[in-house]
Amino acid sequence: MGLLLALLMGLGVWGVFAGIRMYRAEAKLPGDLVLALEVGATRTGAVDSLVDRMGMRYAPAVLRVMGPKQVAKYRRKIDLAGNPGGLTIDRYAARRAVYGALGGVGFLVFLMRGQLFVALLLLAFGAFWTEVGIWSAIRIRRDVIERTLPDFLDVLAVVVSAGLGFRQALDRVASKYEGPWADELRITLRQMDLGMSRRQAFAELRRRNDSEQVAMFVTALQQGEELGAPIVDTLVALAKDMRRTDAQNARRKAARAVPKATMMITTFMVPATMILLGAGLILGSGTDFGSITGE
């Protein structure tokens, strides 16, 4: 047992020094991995950058193990998350390799020491830490887009009614906004500048965003274009529908929160309050517990 523990600790120390050597070495990487390392370099933190450099060498092997279907699945998830911190599929594979190795080594070390709970926590960290970050980024990004979209549509309707064409109005309004929705619109406008049709560019916008309101926006624009409906009326009606949907979602969330709050109160707060009241009454009564217990 002691020999195995020493061997595992030695492997861990060797891994740290090997990672530092790889970080400093001028290793030749494939072109796509070099590009992945450079994309978002100014947006990635120091820890993530170090992890990326340590794991880039193993990223192709991780992608091969994942297979084409899993790679396509996680590439879409990263797109839905908006590439947080410059994350790409290659950076994801690099982080999965590093965190997986750390979690596996930590699992074995603490398992040998008999600390099963800590070992399982480290194993879960290695397996799911990268996925947790992507999942959180997807939720935050979708919420921000859905909060921004109704006000954006109102402003866009005003600019279009002032006489600008839809393409110019979209560019003008998008330049005044910041955040994920403005980024998505700039990508769409750039695609249109490169020759993509407006219909196809907005279909790509819908594909990149897992949001019901974005889907409503794209569908309304495409239907209005086919039927020849006034774009201003379409935008105003769509903004009203989105605000109505937001209000309904808020009421549903509040209705779901009431039973949860009630359960927490009855499970924890009421018994704790009764214990405090009972203890106060007993202590305030001046009862001599020594005479009761015979001590």
Image: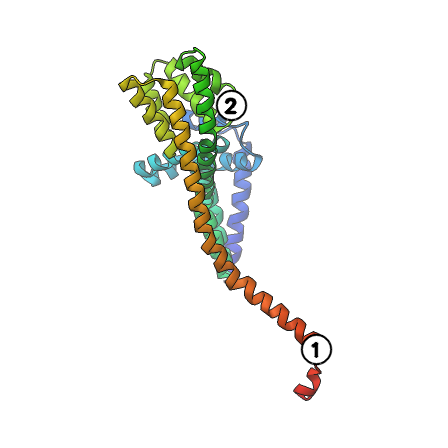
Give the residue type at disc 1: Ser
Q: Is residue 66 left or right of residue 138?
A: left
Q: Position of residue 61 (x, y in %)?
A: 38, 38
Task: Tell me the residue at 51%/23% (across/down).
Answer: 177
Q: Position of residue 93 (x, y in %)?
A: 42, 37
Taking the view exactly as shown, the residue that stands out farthest to the left is: 227
Q: Is residue 259 left or right of residue 288?
A: left
Q: Quadrant of the C terminus?
A: bottom right
Q: Nearer the viewer, mark 1 or mark 2?
A: 1
- Distance Cα–Cα, label 1 vs label 2: 66 Å
Asked whether 63 or 144 is in front, the reply is 144
Q: Position of residue 71 (x, y in %)?
A: 35, 36
Pointer 2 residue: 177
Q: Position of residue 105 (x, y in %)?
A: 48, 51
Residue 2 appears anywhere in the view: no
Asked whether 223 or 57 is in front, the reply is 223
For residue 247, what is the image quadrant? top left
Instruction: Classify mark 1: helix, strand or loop.
Output: loop
For residue 21, what is the image quadrant? top right
